[in-house]
Image (cartoon, grey):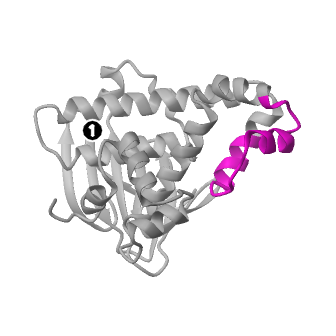
C-alpha cells in the first residue's frame, strides 16, 4: 500500500478505553468503539479482539468480517486492517501479546501470521473466561490468564493442524452445519443421514477430530451464543435460554455454570461492569 498507515502502540485503540491491565508480556484492554470508521492501520503487537457488545465490520487485505457480539478475531503484529462501526454501542475486549510472552512459553511466534476470524465455540468460551479473570484481582490472576491463553493457542494449533491435513469431507461439513444452525434439534441419526455416514462412525469420528463429544460441542455452541446475548438487557434469562435451544431456564443455568463456573446472572453483571 502506498499511503501511510497509523501504527498503534501497546494499549492503544481507537475509542474510549475504560480499563487496561498490564501483566508480564500481556496487555488487556476494555474499549468502547467511538469511531464510525477507522482507516487502514496496524498494531505493533499480535492481539485478539473479542466483541463484547454491539457489532463491527473489519476488513483486511484478504477478507471482510461482520462481527456481532461474541466474535473473536486474531491479528498478527503489523497486519493492516480497517474498521467500520454500524450505529449503536460497540465494545471490545483486546489482548495484546508481546514477543516476550511467546518466548516465555516457548510458543512459535511465526505461527501467528495473518488475520483470522476464529469460529470455534470452545475458543470463544476461553475468551469469556479470560475476561472473567480480569474482574477478579489477586495473586493468581496472571497465572490463570496465562494458563487460559496457553490453552487457547494450543486449541488453535490443534484445530489448524486438523483442518490443514487431508480429512474426510464430513468433518468440515458437520462443523459448518452445527455452527450455522445451532438451534436445530439434531439427532445422531439425522446428522448421520445428512452427512451420508453411519451413526456409529460419526460418533466415534467426531471425538477424534474435535477433541470432544458431539453433545459437548453442541452444548458449547449454545452457551457461547447465550453469552453474546447476556449484554442485551432486554432479554430475560428465560428468553435467552429458549432462544439458544434450552428446554427451560433451569437447564440453561445448570449447563452455563458447569461450563463457566459461574451463574449467568452474575456473569451478566461482569459483562455490563455492574457491582456483583
In the image, 268 versus 60, the foreground residue is 268
Q: Residue at (64%, 55%) from the top-left corner?
A: 63
Q: Main secondary structure of the magenta part?
A: helix
Q: Residue furthest right?
A: 196
Of residues 189 and 223, the one nearer the viewer is: 189
Taking the image as shown, residue 114 lies to the left or right of residue 85, namely right
Q: Position of residue 221 (x, y in %)?
A: 55, 48
Q: Is residue 193 left or right of residue 32?
A: right
Q: Can you say which quadrant of the picture contains the N terminus?
A: bottom right
Residue at figure coordinates x 40%, y 41% from the top left: 259
Q: Secondary structure at mark 1?
A: strand
The residue sitting at the bottom extreme is 87
Left of 11 or right of it: where is 260?
Answer: right
Q: Where are the magenta residues, as a range? A: 173-199
Q: Position of residue 113 (x, y in %)?
A: 53, 36
The answer to whether residue 179 is magenta is: yes
Q: Label 1, on which residue?
A: 26
Q: Is residue 228 visible?
A: yes
Relative to 120, say whether 248 is above or below. Answer: below
Amino acid at each position: 500500500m502506498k499511503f501511510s498507515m497509523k501504527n498503534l502502540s501497546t494499549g492503544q485503540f481507537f475509542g474510549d478505553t475504560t480499563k487496561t491491565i498490564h501483566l508480564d508480556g500481556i496487555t488487556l484492554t476494555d474499549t468502547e468503539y467511538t469511531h464510525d470508521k477507522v482507516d487502514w492501520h496496524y498494531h505493533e503487537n499480535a492481539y485478539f479482539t473479542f466483541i463484547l457488545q454491539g457489532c463491527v465490520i473489519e476488513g483486511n487485505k484478504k477478507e471482510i468480517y461482520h462481527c456481532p457480539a461474541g466474535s473473536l478475531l486474531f491479528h498478527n503484529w503489523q497486519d493492516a486492517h480497517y474498521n467500520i462501526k454500524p450505529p449503536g454501542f460497540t465494545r471490545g475486549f483486546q489482548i495484546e501479546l508481546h514477543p516476550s510472552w511467546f518466548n516465555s512459553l516457548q510458543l512459535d511466534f511465526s505461527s501467528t501470521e495473518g488475520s483470522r476470524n476464529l469460529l470455534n465455540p470452545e475458543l470463544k468460551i476461553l475468551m469469556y473466561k479470560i475476561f472473567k479473570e480480569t474482574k477478579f484481582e489477586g495473586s493468581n490472576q496472571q497465572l490463570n490468564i496465562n494458563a487460559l491463553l496457553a490453552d487457547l493457542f494450543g486449541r488453535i494449533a490443534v484445530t489448524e493442524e486438523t483442518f490443514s491435513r487431508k480429512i474426510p469431507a464430513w468433518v468440515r461439513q458437520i462443523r459448518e452445519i452445527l455452527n450455522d444452525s445451532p438451534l436445530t434439534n439434531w439427532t445422531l441419526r439425522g446428522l448421520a443421514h445428512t452427512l451420508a455416514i453411519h451413526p456409529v462412525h460419526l460418533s466415534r469420528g467426531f471425538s477424534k477430530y474435535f477433541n470432544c463429544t458431539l453433545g459437548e460441542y453442541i452444548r458449547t455452541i449454545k452457551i457461547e451464543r447465550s453469552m453474546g446475548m447476556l449484554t442485551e438487557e432486554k432479554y430475560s434469562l428465560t428468553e435467552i435460554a429458549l432462544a439458544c435451544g434450552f428446554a427451560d431456564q433451569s437447564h440453561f443455568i445448570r449447563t452455563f455454570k458447569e461450563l463457566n463456573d459461574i451463574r449467568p446472572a452474575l456473569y451478566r453483571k461482569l459483562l455490563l461492569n455492574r457491582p456483583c
